[in-house]
Amino acid sequence: MRLSLLLTAAGAAAALILAGCGAAEYSTEGNRESGKQLFIARCAGCHVLAAAGTAGTIGPNLDDAFAQSRADGLTTDTFTQVIRDQILYPIEDPVTDATGMPGPDETLPECDDVEGDAFCVEDRQQAVDDIGVYVGAVAGTGVTTEKPTDGKSIFATTCAQCHTLADAGTAGTVGPNLDQSKPPKTLVTDRVTNGKGTMPSFKDSLDRTQIEAVAEYVSSAAGK
Ligand code: HEC
Ligand code: HEC
């Protein structure tokens, strides 16, 4: 999978050079800080990336995905290109029963297409460049940010993408609106530990203290 993605990216880059075409031109312009914030808001729920302190388990661990290629000498620019392609053209519905990755209309909807206060970006291409440059620079480098230990920060980096919780300022709609369902602490602990349906288990990526902290936070903040 990793190899074929890299090959595709290399092929696409070569085709662009041949065609001299500017439309989808690869850019190293991108704002890393903005890329980090976007990653946490839109990708963290599904991917581990140690530099961002994220714990999602639905998609591949991005440090693992890029560490070997980095060791093999592939450069950050190549990763940036691979990541941009993955965001813009993921396989949303694999033919096997593997889980796909949602397309850009879902991960980075443009504000022109979004109503209300749901998440959106003004300029998708810029957002893709920012995320590509950020993830390309940090994935598989061994750089880590301590995963947060306070419940609200854990929620923001791990749960926000899928759940609405006004106290945390999040508006995810994949899972239940927690202000409405007001789950008791035992239920939060159970879901975070064991997962259910589309919600993955976090028991391998959050430790007990973190699960306890996020459960305490959600059960006390929901519905406020
Ligand atoms: C709902 C879950 C989900 C979200 C949200 C998501 N991804 Fe993914 N991602 C996946 C899955 C599942 C795969 C594996 C399937 C595939 O490679 O297409 C994947 C694959 C990837 C890969 C390829 C990794 C490899 O091993 O080659 C990259 C890079 C990636 N995602 C980056 C991102 C970025 C950046 C975002 C945010 C814009 C994001 N993902 C959002 C689920 C998700
Ligand atoms: C990839 C999306 C996703 C992520 C990330 C996610 N959840 Fe969920 N969550 C769901 C879905 C979907 C359900 C509904 C599961 C079902 O009942 O089938 C759910 C259910 C729940 C419930 C039960 C709510 C109820 O009323 O039934 C709680 C509590 C909960 N999640 C908390 C969390 C917390 C805390 C985190 C972060 C540690 C988190 N979730 C991360 C998707 C997600």
Image (cartoon, rainbow, N blue to C red):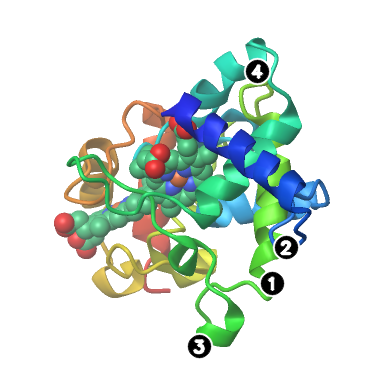
Number of marks drawn: 4
Of the residues under marks 1 and 3, which one precedes in the sequence? 3
Going by the numbered disc 2, the residue's amino acid type is Gln
Q: CA distance from mark 4 to mark 1?
A: 30 Å
Q: Earlier in the sequence, mark 4 or mark 1?
A: 4
Element type at mark 3:
loop
Asked if the residues shown at circle 1 and circle 2 are in contact, with their CB atoms under 8 angstroms apart, the answer is yes
Q: Residue at x 32, y 48 (%)?
A: 100
Give left or right: position of 161 versus 129: left
Furthest-right residue in view? 29
SS state under label 1? loop
The location of residue 159, given as percent across then percent down, is 42, 52
* Residue under numbered circle 3: 116
Q: Earlier in the sequence, mark 3 or mark 2?
A: 3
Numbered label attached to residue 202: none
**Residue 3, position as x, y percentages in the image:** 49, 25
Residue 173, position in %: x, y?
Answer: 36, 69
Residue mark closest to the camera, 4 vs 3: 4
Q: Disc 1 to disc 3, how far (Cα)?
A: 18 Å
User: For mark 1, what is the residue?
Assistant: 123
Q: Which residue is mark 2?
A: 126
Q: Is residue 182 above or below residue 33?
A: below
Q: Earlier in the sequence, mark 4 or mark 3?
A: 4
- Badge 1 amino acid: Asp
Q: Secondary structure at mark 2?
A: helix
For the C terminus, the quadrant is: bottom left
Q: Amino acid at mark 4?
A: Arg
Quarter of the image for residue 136 reads top right
Residue at left 51%, top 83%?
114
